[in-house]
Amino acid sequence: MPNFIIIEQSQFLRMPWKNGLGETLEIQRHEDKIGLRFRISQASVVENGMFSDFSGLHRTLVLLSGEGMTLEHTDSSSKSSHILNKLLDIARFSGGDETYATLKSGKIEDLNIMVRDTDTQAKVEAYSAPCSVLLSNNDTSISTSDTLFSGFYAAEDTVMDIESATPLLIKAHSMVIFSEEINATLAQGNGILIKVTAI
């Protein structure tokens, strides 16, 4: 049977935002001698405002609930934006950008994946049942030993069939962390597949 653990939302670590305007539920964090290598967290955005500066990190943000928001990014030479309107919409941007969030209509919840941009990358994909979920790495340039994290975040109550095992029931807002490479079928629900690797 594949090896995995399930971390429920009640087990997430509450951490205050750097800008003091809210708090994050930290799901996973990895640091080394250089500093933060990656972090996966869940947060609520309750008002318009500037995001904290996370220079040196690349961010992926996934909309989990609410009516959506617009992110406007400014760096030293350009401007860009992301419009998140529907569940599981994804924005990818530099943590060093000046990013301003404008809510469409009330608060939203999001999943935030941050990785150190010099030596780490995150592959983040949204899935809705029914579909196959490939929890393995087909990229021959990346070995299994380069995988730092492999998991599935359930955006709602979810059923996952994992090879020959009994169907796995995953509560909404829980993270399943896999310790080996497997194939699975998402039979019910939706969520986000996250794979963090060294580059």
Image (spheres, rainbow, N blue to C red):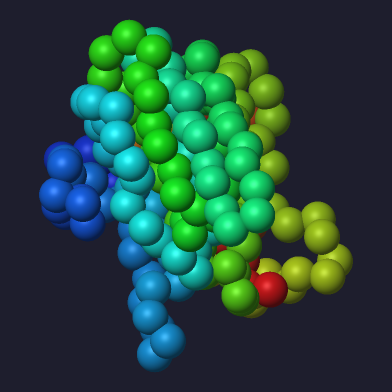
Residue pictured at 38% horizontal, 80% vertical: 35
Q: Would residue 61 appear left or right of 132 to someone viewing this image?
A: left
56 above or below 49? below
Residue pictured at 50% horizontal, 53% vertical: 97
Q: Would residue 72 appear left or right of 43 to someone viewing this image?
A: right
Please name whichever residue, 189 or 199, is drawn nearer the observer in this view of the structure. 199
Where, by quadrant of the figure, is residue 132 drawn?
Answer: top right
144 above or below 195? below
Q: Is residue 86 visible?
A: yes
Q: Would residue 107 appear left or right of 64 to someone viewing this image?
A: left
Q: Position of residue 10 (x, y in %)?
A: 15, 40
Q: Position of residue 32 (x, y in %)?
A: 40, 84
Q: Which image quarter is the C terminus in?
A: bottom right
Residue reaching furthest to the front: 77
Residue pictured at 38% horizontal, 24% vertical: 102
Please name whichever residue, 150 or 97, is drawn nearer the observer in this view of the structure. 97
Q: Is residue 169 visible?
A: no
Residue reaching furthest to the bottom: 33
Q: Position of residue 22 (x, y in %)?
A: 16, 41
Q: Where is residue 98 in the image (x, y as percent from the top left)?
A: 45, 49
